[in-house]
Image (cartoon, helix red, strand yellow):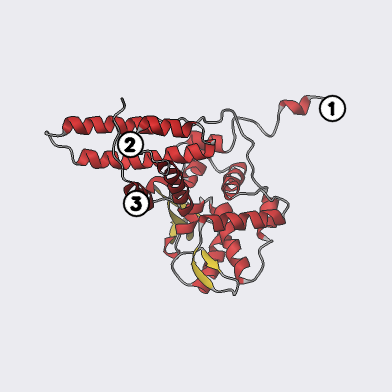
């Protein structure tokens, strides 16, 4: 019979809340674990967890697996820190059971390639032109600008402050750069264009210091920082205005990379600017395994 760990529900949810994650991700992780624990099963039982996850939709299963991995990794670290010569055997047994929990949920990763979406330079101009001169329009242009003009992830844009805008020497003049804290707390510096720098400078004159992205209410009052879902809504709204209602924030990040690559920016530099762990990740990101300029279909007579 499988021995289970006793895991308290409040401790699990508190662990997720304390992690450096987007608010939307915390909600998904919390929901996934809460739904499982609501069945009366203990998170420490790998067999029960596997049985529960087996019939879940793929997306729900993925969130549950990620949440379990996060919680068990924190528990493993705590157990190792409390190990003594007297309890080393029981500690090791507990670590084995935590490892079993991490592998209890199987999520099938889609194979093959998926068509990516990005905008042309002309479409980017058209997208930005949909932002009006009012306060919300100016804010929306900053949101779109950070995604497509600096290649930021949503969470990176949300946490960016005016203090993260710095000047770095470039030849005989200074270049405006963004200091980004990305996934895994990895820091990187992203140089931006003078046009985007000017937009940020004008926006700073309106909102002052602190977080760059702010919510704006119906009365035009600037409030606190934006949410990840708020950014998603802005991208969808302006995408629909140029005939692309399914446009997503990550499509703008991919556009940043694609336009840079087409302009001759080295792939290694694009990889660094995006905060990717390897150039191979960037190659897959840009779908470079397929030559989209010339393909076999071009040589098949259709008329």
Quadrant (top left, top right, bottom left, bottom right) of the C terminus: top right
- Separation of disc 2 and disc 1 at Cα? 61 Å
Residue 141 location, quadrant: bottom right
Residue at 67% x, 67% y: name it. Answer: 132
Q: Earlier in the sequence, mark 3 or mark 2?
A: 3
Q: Is residue 294 left or right of residue 72?
A: right
Relative to the observer, which residue lies in front, 230 or 161? 230
Q: Return the residue found at the far left.
A: 86
Q: Position of residue 19 (x, y in %)?
A: 37, 50
Residue at 49% x, 43% y: name it. Answer: 269
Q: Earlier in the sequence, mark 1 or mark 3?
A: 3
Q: Earlier in the sequence, mark 2 or mark 1?
A: 2
Mark 2: give few (<14), some (14-19) or many (20+) Cα within 10 Å.
many
Tag 1 and tag 3, C-beta contact below 8 Å: no
Residue 149 visible? The answer is no
Relative to the observer, which residue lies in front, 22 or 256? 22
Location of residue 205 with respect to 84 vertically, above or below: below
| Local secondary structure at mark 3 | helix
Q: Which residue is mark 3?
A: 14
| Local secondary structure at mark 2 | loop
Residue at 53% x, 35% y: name it. Answer: 58
| Local secondary structure at mark 1 | loop
Q: Which residue is mark 1?
A: 302
Residue 44 disc label: 2
Q: Position of residue 7 (x, y in %)?
A: 31, 42
Q: Position of residue 183 (x, y in %)?
A: 42, 46
């Amino acid at each position: 019979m499988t021995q289970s760990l006793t895991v308290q529900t409040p401790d699990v949810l508190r662990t997720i809340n304390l992690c450096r994650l987007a608010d939307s991700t915390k909600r998904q992780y919390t929901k996934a674990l809460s739904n499982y624990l609501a069945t009366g099963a203990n998170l420490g039982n790998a067999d029960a967890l596997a049985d529960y996850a087996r019939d879940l939709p793929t997306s729900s299963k993925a969130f549950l697996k990620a949440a379990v991995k996060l919680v068990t990794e924190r528990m493993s670290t705590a157990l190792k820190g409390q190990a003594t010569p007297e309890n080393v055997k029981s500690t090791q047994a507990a670590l084995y059971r935590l490892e079993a929990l991490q592998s209890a949920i199987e999520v099938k990763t889609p194979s093959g390639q998926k068509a990516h979406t990005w905008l042309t330079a002309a479409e980017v101009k058209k997208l930005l032109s949909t932002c009006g001169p009012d306060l919300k329009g100016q804010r929306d242009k900053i949101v779109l600008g950070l995604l497509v003009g600096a290649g930021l992830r949503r969470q990176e844009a949300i946490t960016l402050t005016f203090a993260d805008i710095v000047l770095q020497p470039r030849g005989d003049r200074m270049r405006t750069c963004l200091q980004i804290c990305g996934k895994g707390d990895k820091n990187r510096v992203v140089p931006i264009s003078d046009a985007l720098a000017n937009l940020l400078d004008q926006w700073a004159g309106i909102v002052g210091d602190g977080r760059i992205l702010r919510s704006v209410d119906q009365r035009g009052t600037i409030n606190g920082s934006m949410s990840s879902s708020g950014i998603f809504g802005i991208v969808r709204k302006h995408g629909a205005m140029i005939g692309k209602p399914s446009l997503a924030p990550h499509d703008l990040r991919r556009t940043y990379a694609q336009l840079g690559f087409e302009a001759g920016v080295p792939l290694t530099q694009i990889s660094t600017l995006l905060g990717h762990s390897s150039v191979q990740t960037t190659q897959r990101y840009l779908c470079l395994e397929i030559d989209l300029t010339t393909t076999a279909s071009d040589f098949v007579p259709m008329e």
